[in-house]
Image (cartoon, rainbow, N blue to C red):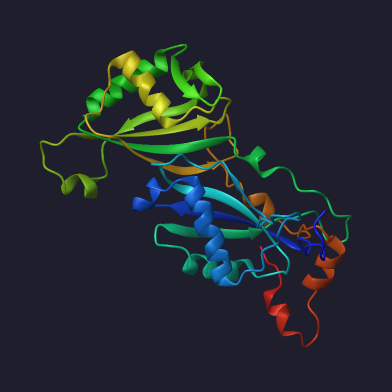
Amino acid sequence: MPEGPAPAPVIQRLRVRYAKRGRLRFTSHRDISRAVERAVRRAGIPVAFSAGFTPHPKISYAGAAATGVASEAEYLEIGLTETRDPARVRDELDAALPAGLDIVDVVPVRAGRAGDAPVKPGAFTDRLQASRWRIRLDGVSYDDAAAAVAAFLDAGEIEVERLTKKGRRRFDVRAAVQALEAQSPEPDRRAAEAADAPCAILRMVVRHSTPAVRPDDILTGLRQVADLAPPSPPLVTRLAQGPLDAATGGLADPLDPDRESGLPSGDDAETARDRTRPQPGDAASADAVSA
């Protein structure tokens, strides 16, 4: 075992929603995690570290989008050794990150109501039940896209094949699609294009499954059932991910449960209560955790 003092405990956990925009969509997940770690150090955020010979910052990621995909709803969780105002962390971290990696929201992880025994928060990934996607298909007319969508939705099963970590697998992509529709481009975007340049937009809600059904798998399915083959690479953007309402097909904000009143979670809940309780004349009370 390595010698020396034990690492400081996690006093506060924060969940962060961030966006991956523009050219940053081509950044790999490993490079994004490195950029986040550098930004945390640059911003002076008191991140907790793991024990052992090679300590790592306690930053974990959930439901990361693939390289080449833009996203408005990526999530990470960070453990802190001190309590910080989430709004302050949001501003400082956003300022330290490169343009295109933008912090959208920061909320503290909650562990129960005040006065109750601390309760372990549920796994955040359990809330990420589905994703809402937008796919821009340049060179495809709305009529062709709408016909392909209709054929896709009418199919009972659509199997595609993809190389996974466990080798080549065949799986049904139709079952994962909760909603799918074709749209014409937004008027402001369409006005800037030549009149003879067709373009269609696909919007879809896809349930998370194993193996994961990705937007490119659905495009493969559309090609199988309707021979829909965009002449140029599609522009894929994740708009949201979260709990799925199967009746309406809508997605809730996965951070909403953390906005409810309760105790911040950490490795030492009693210490957390002491540190988050404002003290008379204590300037640090301005950083008390708030939803």
Frontmost residue, 281 versus 45 = 45
Q: In this view, does 279 lie above or below 248?
A: below
Q: In this view, does 77 lie above or below 130?
A: below
> Which quadrant of the view contains residue 140?
top left
> Which quadrant of the view contains residue 11?
bottom right
Q: Which residue is drawn at 23% across and 47% down?
A: 189
Q: Which residue is drawn at 42% across and 48% down?
A: 27
Q: Residue furthest top?
A: 156
Percent across and percent down for residue 168 are 49, 18
Q: Is residue 175 above or below residue 277?
A: above
Percent across and percent down for residue 22 are 34, 52
Please indicate whether residue 42 sits to the left or right of residue 142 in the image.
right
Percent across and percent down for residue 277 are 80, 73
Percent across and percent down for residue 217 are 42, 25
Q: Residue at x 35, y 22 (%)?
A: 149
Please indicate whether residue 254 sits to the left or right of residue 91 in the image.
right
Q: In this view, does 282 lie above or below 51?
A: below
